[in-house]
Image (cartoon, grey):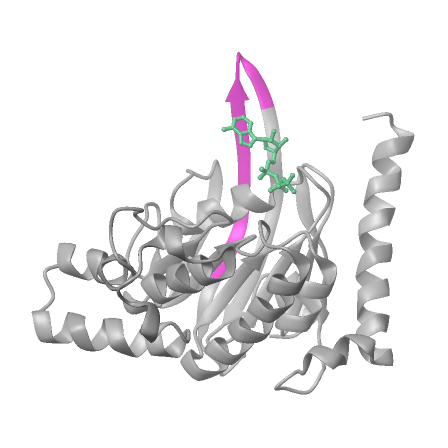
């Protein structure tokens, strides 16, 4: 995916397969007879295996956008296509992860990961294998018999990730998944997510407020404008992988960070001048 291709809403000649294609998505909320235009128009084409982050000024519509892709919020117009199929409701092809863990407090870790698979009535042997594989992948197999209340915030989010991956979704949609964690745990989780992503090679759409998190994890960072949002710029993050935590100190990393910071602050300044 190149910047021009994304800006143009896709790569007509591209050989790589699209994982998530967003065509002219617009969203207007209605509250007390008042219309609130959250998203003016977003076009994106995320190829299979890409990690794409979305950043933008507070309230610009990032979560709304991700929830539209997840099928949890109806769009006003436009099209969302995941692996060739138009989506209008939640489905197992899209695994969603939120800021707060969605684990059941009364179920042990392994049962939490198994729960959705049991609902889907998968064979017992397959459930057992998937639970073991994904708990090992997130490094928490030895905590399989613990309750969520016995885990730290970072561990809970790793279990949540194992739970989502166990469904084998085609794409992962992540809404500030590390937003509630302290900065050190957050850095550790970012490194973990990079490792897990490189092993699973899922396509990821990741919403964050944290510019460094976006640069560290992503192939592309999509910068949204202030509300009603449009795609202001798409930045290709051309840093080698795997990325060590120390890459944050490199000249190139700081350069990407500053560029995105400037783009976001241009948006915020316009807002302040207007007194909004
Ligand atoms: N259900 C709703 N009804 C009416 N307006 C809504 C609804 N949900 C969101 N909005 C509005 O849409 C806009 C975008 O909200 P959204 O939460 O998507 O932004 P965001 O970029 O994720 O915000 P933040 O960065 O603060 O988390 C906001 O103005 C918000 O008030």
Q: Mostly what secondary structure, the magenta segment?
A: strand
Q: Position of residue 73 (x, y in %)?
A: 42, 39
Is-magenta flag for residue 24?
A: yes
Left or right position of 91 against 195: left
- Residue at (83, 34) in percent of width and height: 271
Q: Where is ligand 1, by quadrant? A: top right
Q: Nearer the viewer, residue 258 or 140?
A: 140
As drawn, 70 above or below 94: above
Residue closer to the observer: 13 or 129: 129
Q: In this picture, which residue range is highlighted in magenta? A: 21-35
Is 30 placed left or right of 114 in the picture? right
Q: Residue at x 73, y 41 (%)?
A: 226
Quadrant into which the C terminus falls: top right
Q: For residue 8, say whether it is visible.
A: no
Q: Nearer the viewer, residue 25 or 171?
A: 171
Quarter of the image for residue 146 reads bottom left
């Amino acid at each position: 995916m190149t910047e021009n291709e994304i800006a143009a809403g896709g790569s007509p000649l591209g050989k790589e397969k699209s994982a998530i294609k967003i065509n002219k998505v617009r969203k207007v909320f209605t509250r007390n007879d008042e219309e609130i235009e959250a998203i003016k128009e977003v076009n994106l084409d995320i190829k299979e295996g890409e990690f794409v982050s979305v950043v933008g000024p507070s309230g610009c519509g990032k979560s709304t956008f991700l929830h539209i892709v997840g099928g949890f919020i109806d769009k006003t117009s436009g099209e969302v296509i995941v692996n060739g199929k138009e989506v209008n409701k939640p489905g197992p092809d899209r695994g969603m992860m939120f800021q707060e863990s969605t684990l059941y407090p009364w179920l042990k870790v392994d049962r939490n990961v198994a729960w959705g698979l049991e609902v889907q009535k998968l064979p017992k042997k397959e459930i057992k294998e998937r639970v073991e594989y994904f708990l090992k992948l997130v490094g928490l197999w030895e905590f399989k018999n613990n309750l969520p209340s016995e885990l730290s915030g970072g561990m809970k989010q790793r279990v949540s990730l194992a739970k989502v991956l166990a469904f084998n979704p085609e794409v992962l949609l992540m809404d500030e998944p590390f937003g509630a964690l302290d900065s050190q745990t957050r850095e550790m989780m970012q490194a973990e997510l990079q490792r897990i992503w490189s092993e699973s090679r899922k396509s990821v759409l990741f919403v964050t407020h944290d510019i460094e998190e976006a640069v560290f994890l992503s192939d592309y960072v999509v910068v949204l404008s202030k509300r009603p949002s449009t795609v202001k710029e798409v930045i290709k993050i051309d840093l080698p992988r795997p990325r060590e935590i120390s890459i944050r100190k490199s000249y190139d990393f700081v350069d990407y960070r500053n560029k995105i910071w400037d783009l976001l602050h241009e948006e915020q300044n316009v807002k302040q001048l207007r007194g909004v």
